[in-house]
Amino acid sequence: MASSRNPRIKQIIETVAVIVLLGLVGLKGAESGSTFSYEAINCRKHSSSLTDFGGVGDGKTSNTIAFRKAIEHLSQFGAQGGSQLIVSPGKWLTGSFNLTSNFTLFLHKDAVILASQDEKDYPIVPPLPSYGRGRELPGPRYGAFIYGTNLTDIVITGNNGTIDGQGAIWWEKFRNNQTNYTRPHLIEIMYSNQVQISNLTLLNSQFWVVHPVYSSNVLVLGLTILAPTDSANTDGIDPDSCTNVRIEDCFVVSGDDCIAIKSGWDQYGIAFGMPTKHVIIRRFTCISPDSAVIALGSEMSGGIEDVRIEDIYALNSESGVRIKSSPGRGGYVKDIFVRRFTMNTMKYVFWMTGAYGSHPDDGYDPKAVPVIKGINYNDMVAQNVTMAANLAGIDNDPFAGICISNVTIGLSAKPKKLQWNCTDIAGTTSEVTPPPCSLLPDNGKSTCPFPTNKLPIEDVKLQTCSC
Ligand SMILES: *[C@@H]1O[C@H](CO)[C@@H](O)[C@H](O)[C@H]1NC(C)=O
Ligand SMILES: *[C@@H]1O[C@H](CO)[C@@H](O)[C@H](O)[C@H]1NC(C)=O
Ligand SMILES: *[C@@H]1O[C@H](CO)[C@@H](O)[C@H](O)[C@H]1NC(C)=O
Ligand SMILES: *[C@@H]1O[C@H](CO)[C@@H](O)[C@H](O)[C@H]1NC(C)=O
Ligand SMILES: *[C@@H]1O[C@H](CO)[C@@H](O)[C@H](O)[C@H]1NC(C)=O
Ligand SMILES: *[C@@H]1O[C@H](CO)[C@@H](O)[C@H](O)[C@H]1NC(C)=O
Ligand SMILES: *[C@@H]1O[C@H](CO)[C@@H](O)[C@H](O)[C@H]1NC(C)=O
Ligand SMILES: *[C@@H]1O[C@H](CO)[C@@H](O)[C@H](O)[C@H]1NC(C)=O
Ligand SMILES: *[C@@H]1O[C@H](CO)[C@@H](O)[C@H](O)[C@H]1NC(C)=O
Ligand SMILES: *[C@@H]1O[C@H](CO)[C@@H](O)[C@H](O)[C@H]1NC(C)=O
């Protein structure tokens, strides 16, 4: 080529080429107006829109077949660079559907996926082996609205698009004993590795909202989860027998615990033996007038360990980090670390319950008592509190190694007379007001441990993808 003999001309040609290319890119973006970027563990090679499969976003037409056909079609690209399904602006009514591996479900900011209120749109699936039965009723349960099992690398994300469980009818039926099986979760991911659920608004779930179970490497980022505070058991985020979980920048208003960390139920959970461990929760905001900001249990029979909690803000909630267990549960809760937790308007700051009850059936072993130890709290401030601490372990099985440091609790206009009610617990405190009970003696000026290492899940970097 001529340019290769003349460096000056070569340079001009290259410059022009770059300008033309930039112009084309700019035009493409402007013309289509439909390129979006999002962050994910992996980007995908193949892309389809729900409308390619006959989807109609009018809020009335059922898209159950469109969703199921779309994902079945896209599942063939699992080993060829993966795929993404784009849900455009509109209201997309659908029954339950299943995800596939190496797959992203992307919701435009003005996309709303509406969950069918017809029970027939939910398959009946077996109970979780670690629960032995449906959580609410014996026997099988409804499959989750968005369900995935035995998968690798799944992303559910959007630029704050919405998934609405339309749960009111389920809450009503549940209260009137009219559900035939345990209600469906909004999102349940089972036996999976590499899971990301991010930048979405999740409304009015039928039951628990986000339920990763028997899974590992789970990222839950930037979710807004809303349900009426009187809705039945709308727990926000429930990691259950999971390893390596990172929950960041989420906001939950709910009718039950904002987060509940679990690991199976009594004899079934003990036999299954799969703990939840290596969990980080940070920059989390919760409103839960009748439940906990973060509950550990009550189903904890596979064990819960190494949970790190920091930078939490709670408003109008019943309790902060609550431990719930019972004889029969077995298992353990250990190495729990909490720091920088701010609360306003609380019934209890600290609550531990060793007599939670609630058993799957009469087959539990009352001698299977849980081991609760190494529970650490640092740097907490609370205002408008009714009772500082209600801490009850189990007779002959004290909850031990409780450490509380640098905590200032301001009381409400009508506080309880007894501020610290302690039975069957052991530990120490430092710089805590109002003054703790005698079972938690003052340890001078000392702080409680918080790990200095990072969990592997904290180092997972996201890529910028487009669609
Ligand atoms: C979520 O959205 C925020 C801003 O809206 C953005 O900064 C962040 O990268 C997004 N995160 C993910 C995981 O997409
Ligand atoms: C997912 O993608 C990975 C990496 O390309 C590949 O090894 C794996 O086989 C894919 N999984 C499925 C189920 O297609
Ligand atoms: C989803 O997968 C589960 C487990 O394989 C199955 O029982 C259920 O019927 C599937 N749901 C749909 C809608 O296909
Ligand atoms: C899913 O994985 C679990 C645990 O490895 C296994 O027991 C089960 O059979 C698998 N299910 C399917 C449908 O492959
Ligand atoms: C997402 O939408 C919800 C509900 O409209 C809103 O409360 C929240 O602030 C939004 N989040 C972001 C990051 O825009
Ligand atoms: C539902 O059943 C429970 C236990 O069987 C019973 O206590 C309750 O009164 C029933 N509620 C209604 C509305 O029938
Ligand atoms: C639920 O059970 C009742 C009887 O108790 C029955 O009439 C109804 O059809 C069942 N609903 C479904 C969706 O199976
Ligand atoms: C005590 O906790 C408060 C609130 O988190 C914090 O501002 C303060 O720095 C802490 N004090 C010490 C000595 O760490
Ligand atoms: C204090 O808590 C009570 C409920 O215990 C609530 O009614 C009141 O509004 C709260 N006050 C402030 C200033 O938040
Ligand atoms: C203190 O806790 C014990 C054990 O849970 C309970 O029996 C007792 O009633 C409580 N006392 C007060 C005053 O709340």
Image: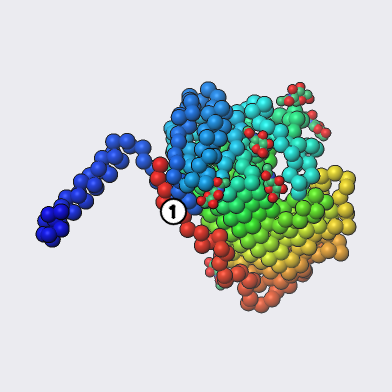
Q: Position of residue 57 (x, y in %)?
A: 47, 27
Judge whether 107 appears above or below 352 on screen.
above
Q: Measured from the top left, where is residue 97 in percent x and y?
A: 59, 34
Q: Amino acid at mark 1?
A: Gln
433 or 69: nearer the viewer:
69
Q: Residues within 10 Å of mark 1 (few under 14, many from 20)?
A: few
Asked which quadrant contains residue 100, the reply is top right
Q: Residue at x 67, y 26 (%)?
A: 120
Is residue 320 among what the camera can see?
A: no
Q: Is residue 242 left or right of residue 35?
A: right
Name the residue beneath numbered marker 1. 463
> Is 182 or 310 nearer to us in this picture?
182
Q: Is residue 388 left or right of residue 425?
A: left
Query: Is residue 32 among what the camera can see?
Result: yes
> Residue at 29% across / 39% down in the picture?
28
The answer to which quarter of the image holds residue 117 is top right
Residue under the point 64% across and 46% down: 150
Quarter in which the N terminus is drawn: bottom left
Mark 1: which secondary structure?
A: strand
Image quadrant occupied by the C terminus: top left
* Rendered view: 237 above or below 232: below
| Residue 360 placement: quadrant | top right
Q: Which residue: 76% across, 49% down? A: 130
Query: Looking at the picture, how far across and down is residue 180, in whole percent?
Result: 75, 30
